[in-house]
DNA sequence: GTCTATATGTTGATAGAC
DNA sequence: GTCTATCAACATATAGAC
């Protein structure tokens, strides 16, 4: 079983027109994640992909569309992983269920594709860029990609938490996202694979983050249902 | 007592060479906060400030130095407010003390200068840019500006939390910063002054965020001291 | 101190050969 | 499909008049 032979590249199902498109998308992901939209030029992208600017424009039409294509391609597996983990988490109930849901929400960000799994500390995640870069198309794409998933998680939390103010719950979920994004944005020092061969340190950090976010959600919701008397949080 | 007459501008103590420098710094803050470094051109800045590119370069030398000057000017009052609030918070002890410290750390970000106080939802905070923009000078400046303050808060938390793993505490503080940054990065819907004239809704959101972050810190530290046996967390 | 004019390089996108 | 050559517009920074 050869680990990766050159021939394996031909198996890639993505290349509908050759693999130039795929190489471009890979290059875009890398550079956008590292530098952001405006700091990444078409020349840099196409040079990294081993092709020309005009080829990129032939395939994607514009720089913004190229980014867009990369984003949807890249976030699909992320959201799939989240939803899959959510299905398991929903079996449990109570605060343990909340913790499991939060874990399902956060963990794929950290390990699947765009997180710490693929590079040392300084490389930023594409997911972070999605929430940070200014161009309008990024905002729209972000909504298109994440809104349905966020709604699913909101509903799941609503069920697990009992009868709480939906607005407070929405805020709580967003704050827990902030925890995850900041931690993959290059501000936390993650151990290198050499320092942490078993991955136990990394695992523990992730456990800590999940505990942090879950406790935050629970505290925020409790505070809401304790302080609020008129808007529907205290009729348990 | 006239609220703000044009003559009041002359009182501004900043203008050492006229007020062109001050106007430039204001313009820089606005545009950098909204668009980030690479998306903000010297032309846009100087146009907004009502002066020329060469005047800006005369005063600051380069675009990066202009940003740098704006950052230090703008974060000084922020950090002063944080440290002042910290002094009060340190009087208290226990988990209530932790909550007060977190509040001192987060709240000035939300109200003083660079947060929600000065614009509607879509405008990003300069503080967010500091943690998000790629140029190397921003990273260095960020360290220079925030490292001492962070150390002070780390120490305070260390005292308030008892004997916990310093590394875990550092992570916990960073995660709570992530909560605050994400919430002022344009992803939370803050009420407009018209919708919320008394400010009570905003206040409640801030209370929720502080509760979220404090609970997160406490949970993360408890988890560490419960699961760890060898590295110095469990010898109480 | 502030301006106009300019130097020098880079950007995103396109035209047209192959 | 992919390239080279080119476009107009933009970038940062500087020179020199006032």
Image (cartoon, coloured by chain):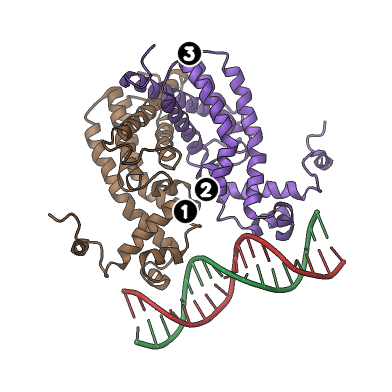
Chain colours: A brown, B purple, C green, D red
The chain carrying label 2 is B
Q: Is residue A220 left or right of residue B207?
A: left
Q: Which residue is label 2 attached to?
A: B133
Position of residue B58 measured from the top left corner of the image (x, y, whole percent): 74, 56
Q: Are marks 1 and 3 on the same chain?
A: no
Relative vertical location of residue B149 with respect to residue B35 in this rendering, above or below: above
Q: Are marks 1 and 2 in contact (CB under 8 Å)?
A: no
Relative vertical location of residue B67 with respect to residue B159 in this rendering, above or below: below
Give the residue drawn at x 70%, y 52%: B60
Position of residue A191 measured from the top left corner of the image (x, y, whole percent): 36, 38
Q: Are marks 1 and 3 in contact (CB under 8 Å)?
A: no
The chain carrying label 3 is B
Relative vertical location of residue A200 with respect to residue A81 in this rendering, above or below: above
Q: Which residue is label 3 attached to?
A: B94
Relative vertical location of residue A61 with respect to residue A155 in this rendering, above or below: below
Position of residue B176 measured from the top left corner of the image (x, y, whole percent): 47, 30
Q: Which residue is label 1 attached to?
A: A35
Q: Residue furthest left?
A: A1
The chain carrying label 1 is A
Per the model, the C-alpha gap separating discs 1 and 2 is 8 Å
Element type at mark 2: loop
Give the residue drawn at x 32%, y 55%: A73
Answer yes or no: is residue A21 visible. yes
Quadrant position of residue B115: top right
Quadrant position of residue B16: top right
Please state, as top left, top right, bottom left or bottom right, where the C terminus of chain A lies in the image: top left
Neighbour class for label 3 at 10 Å: few (<14), some, many (≥20)?
Answer: few
Q: Is residue A175 left or right of residue B201?
A: left
Position of residue B235 measured from the top left corner of the image (x, y, whole percent): 37, 13
Q: Is residue A209 left or right of residue B148?
A: left
Q: Residue furthest front?
A: A194
């Amino acid at each position: 079983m050869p680990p990766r032979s050159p021939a394996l590249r031909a198996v890639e199902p993505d290349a509908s027109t050759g693999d130039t498109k795929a190489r471009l998308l890979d290059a875009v992901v890398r550079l956008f994640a590292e530098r952001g939209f405006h700091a990444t030029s078409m020349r840099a992208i196409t040079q990294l992909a081993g092709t020309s600017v005009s080829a990129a424009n032939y395939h994607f039409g514009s720089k913004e569309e190229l980014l867009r294509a990369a984003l949807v391609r890249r976030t699909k597996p992320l959201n799939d992983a989240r939803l899959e983990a959510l299905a398991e988490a929903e079996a449990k109930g109570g605060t343990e269920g909340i913790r499991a849901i939060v874990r399902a929400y956060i963990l794929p960000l950290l390990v699947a594709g765009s997180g710490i799994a693929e590079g040392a500390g300084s490389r930023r995640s594409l997911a972070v860029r999605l929430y940070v870069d200014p161009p309008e198309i990024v905002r729209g794409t972000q909504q298109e990609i994440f809104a349905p998933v966020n709604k699913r998680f909101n509903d799941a939390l609503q069920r697990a938490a009992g009868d709480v103010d939906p607005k407070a719950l929405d805020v709580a979920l967003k704050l827990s996202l902030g925890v995850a994004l900041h931690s993959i944005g290059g501000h936390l020092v993650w151990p290198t694979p050499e320092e942490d061969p078993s991955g136990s340190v990394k695992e523990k950090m992730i456990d800590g983050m999940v505990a942090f976010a879950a406790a935050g959600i629970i505290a925020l919701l409790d505070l809401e249902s304790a302080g609020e008397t008129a808007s529907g949080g205290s009729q348990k």
